[in-house]
């Protein structure tokens, strides 16, 4: 009986501990969706409405807009990083995993790039975000690229950093030009990297 009584408070405590984390993730998802639709200067009330919370909840988690923007950016980078190992485990081939992840990365760059731009005036903040971005995503890209090349018995002609940098350059301006299909060009880049590695 004592054990059962001890279990109930523990279960309640773990619910209380887990809920704020989930709430923050929901806020970040809502903010990311609003930023994509309305830009990073969208009113906080729009984010609150999408998340189904009061504006006070947003300010309690993120007292300033730059804090919210940084949190959303990091949240999106983490989602992109986490997708790499999952795709490698679930995709029919390692090349398919690489291509699917690259498509996610392109979507991140095209739709979320304004997040980093919102901190343009704060060079220290922008530099820190860039370092975080590189540190998290280059190893993920590297593991996917290595697996895809290994599956065809090839060596990489270029490192993961340069692959991501090339993808980034191909994505510049894509959000502002509906006729420009960055995804197609990026997939051609990946085809070239994989074909070049075979020779």
Image (tube, rainbow, N blue to C red):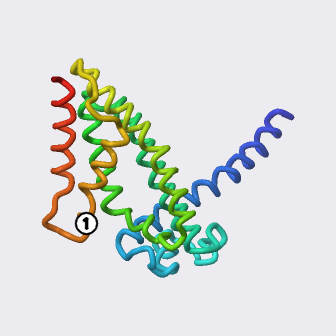
Q: Nearest the camera: 119 or 89? A: 119
Q: Quadrant of the C terminus?
A: top left
Which image quadrant: the N terminus?
top right
Residue 134: percent from left, percent from top: 45, 47
What is the residue that sits farthest to the left in this orientation?
179
At 18% from the left and 24% from the top, the residue drawn is 198
Query: Where's residue 165, x and y in %?
Result: 33, 49
- 103 vs 167, nearest the viewer: 167
Residue at x 48%, y 59% (from the top left corner): 73
Residue displayed at 24% across by 55% down: 170
Mark count = 1
Using the image, determine if residue 153 lies above or below residue 133: above
* Residue occupied by mark 1: 173
Q: Nearer the viewer, residue 17 or 73?
A: 73
Element marked by disc 1: loop
Residue 4, image quadrant: top right
- Residue 122's place in the image compared with 154, above or below, is below
Q: Residues within 10 Å of mark 1 (few under 14, many from 20)?
A: few
Residue depicted at 42% across the width and 41% down the height: 138
Q: Residue furthest top?
A: 153
Left or right of 153: which side holds 165?
right
**Left or right: 85 with respect to 187?**
right
Up-down relation of residue 6 to residue 104 (above or below): above
In this view, the residue in front, 170 or 33, is: 170
The picture places residue 152, in percent across and down from the top left corner, at 21, 21
Q: Is residue 183 left or right of residue 74?
A: left
Outermost residue, right side: 2
Instruction: Classify residue 128 by image quadrant.
Output: bottom right
Could you say where residue 32 lies in the image, as x and y percent from the top left? 44, 65
């Amino acid at each position: 009986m004592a054990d059962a009584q001890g279990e109930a408070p523990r279960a309640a405590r773990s619910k209380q501990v887990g809920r704020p984390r989930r709430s923050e993730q929901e806020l970040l998802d809502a903010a990311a969706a609003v930023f994509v639709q309305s830009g990073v200067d969208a009113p906080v009330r729009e984010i609150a409405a999408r998340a189904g919370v009061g504006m006070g909840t947003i300010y309690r988690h993120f007292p300033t807009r730059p804090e919210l923007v940084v949190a959303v950016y990091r949240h999106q980078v983490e989602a992109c990083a986490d997708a790499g190992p999952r795709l490698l485990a679930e995709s029919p081939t390692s090349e398919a995993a690489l291509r699917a992840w690259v498509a996610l990365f392109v979507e991140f760059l095209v739709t979320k790039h304004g997040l980093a731009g919102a901190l343009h005036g704060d060079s220290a903040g922008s530099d820190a975000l860039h370092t975080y971005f590189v540190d998290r995503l280059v190893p993920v890209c590297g593991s996917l690229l290595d697996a895809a090349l290994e599956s065809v018995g090839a060596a990489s002609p270029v490192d993961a950093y340069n692959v991501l940098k090339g993808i980034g350059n191909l994505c510049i301006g894509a959000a502002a030009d509906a006729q420009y299909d960055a995804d197609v060009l990026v997939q051609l880049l990946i085809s070239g990297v994989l074909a070049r590695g075979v020779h």
